[in-house]
Amino acid sequence: MSARLDRNWPRASEWLAKSQPGGLTVIGAPVCRGSITPGHCDQAPAAIRAALIRFSTYDIDNETDLLEVAVRDLGDLPVSEMSPEQMFAPVRDAIANAPRPVVLLGGDNSITRPGVHAMGGLAHTGLITIDAHFDLRDLDGGLTNGNPVRALLRDGLPGPNVVQIGIQSFANSGAYARIAREAGITVISCKQTHEIGLEESLRSAFAKLAAMERIYVDLDLDVMDRGFAPATPGSRPGGVTPWELRMAARMCGLHPKVQAMDVVEMDPSRDVADVTAFTAAACLLEFAAGFARRKQ
């Protein structure tokens, strides 16, 4: 039975379906062939869009309505059957040619590499990862969702241009921690994130990257506590809460240098009561709410 419609309660799904140019751009990148853990991350963009029907468009904190924010949904890129190597150019080009800011709905974390390249020159691009993992695995076996940051370092992204927030103990290795340290990456562990708060951690990241011309944000849903993110294969106990992640997404939408944010690593086939999909959808809305304030 479908939900009863109320003309005084517009749904976020209606907002996204309006597809008005001149504001925020949404692109689906249903990539999953690079996933270390087999699954169905390719189903995530559709699941996130479907979850929007359960949200309204009204932001009570700022007394604004997203119906007043132009958004254009470009749909899903035809990349679900492509390897990370094959999908690089289509994803990069789609983002590079889209009006910014862009929210990229993954798909697995391998889409972060083409997303960063789409921003322009790597030397002046900052990368913030909100993630339980370094994503610095070896490249010997090819590109995966476990090594986009390692690949970007190889491509020429300077390590000091990278800030990683939420890195979990017992979800990474000492070898990759050394690579991060030697590259000059700023790492804010999950423990440190809890001590100072995710919002303050993100403020610190923005301050660190103040000299950058543009910033790309990788929002990996597995940074959340596993109880809140059953659809993320890489989540662990002790991660951040959905509330914290929503506020981080809002901050990213508000920041003038954030040109793109991806939302990755959700496998809807593993979800419970759509809890992970709801958080992913809420992060899209929070980014849009932040963007609405950016334009004021």
Image (cartoon, grey):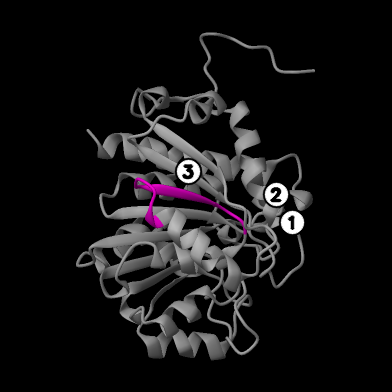
Q: How many badges with numbers are in the image?
A: 3
Label 2–label 1 contact, CB within 8 A: yes
Say if 39 sits above or below 34 in the image: above
Mark 2 vs mark 3: which is more N-terminal?
3
**288 left or right, relative to 142:** left
Distance, label 1 to label 3, CA atoms, is 20 Å
The residue range painted magenta reads 96-107
Residue at (66% x, 52% y) in the render: 229
Residue 100 highlighted magenta (yes or no): yes
Distance, label 2 to label 1, CA atoms, is 6 Å
Residue underneath mark 1? 40
Distance, label 2 to label 3, CA atoms, is 16 Å
Say if 15 sits above or below 258 in the image: above
Residue underneath mark 3? 26
**What amino acid is found at the position of numbered circle 2 in the picture?**
Gln
Say if 85 sits above or below 60 in the image: below
Q: Position of residue 195 (x, y in %)?
A: 43, 63
Q: Report the residue that reaches farthest toward the top.
A: 7
Q: Position of residue 85 (x, y in %)?
A: 58, 73
Residue underneath mark 2? 43
Residue at (50% x, 31% y) in the render: 16
Q: Nearer the viewer, residue 15 or 288?
A: 15
Residue 190 makes an appearance in the image? no
Residue at (34% x, 62% y) in the render: 119
Residue 94 highlighted magenta (yes or no): no
Q: Position of residue 178 (x, y in %)?
A: 47, 90
Which quadrant of the view contains residue 69? top left
**What amino acid is found at the position of numbered circle 1 in the picture?**
His
Q: Nearer the viewer, residue 188 or 37?
A: 37
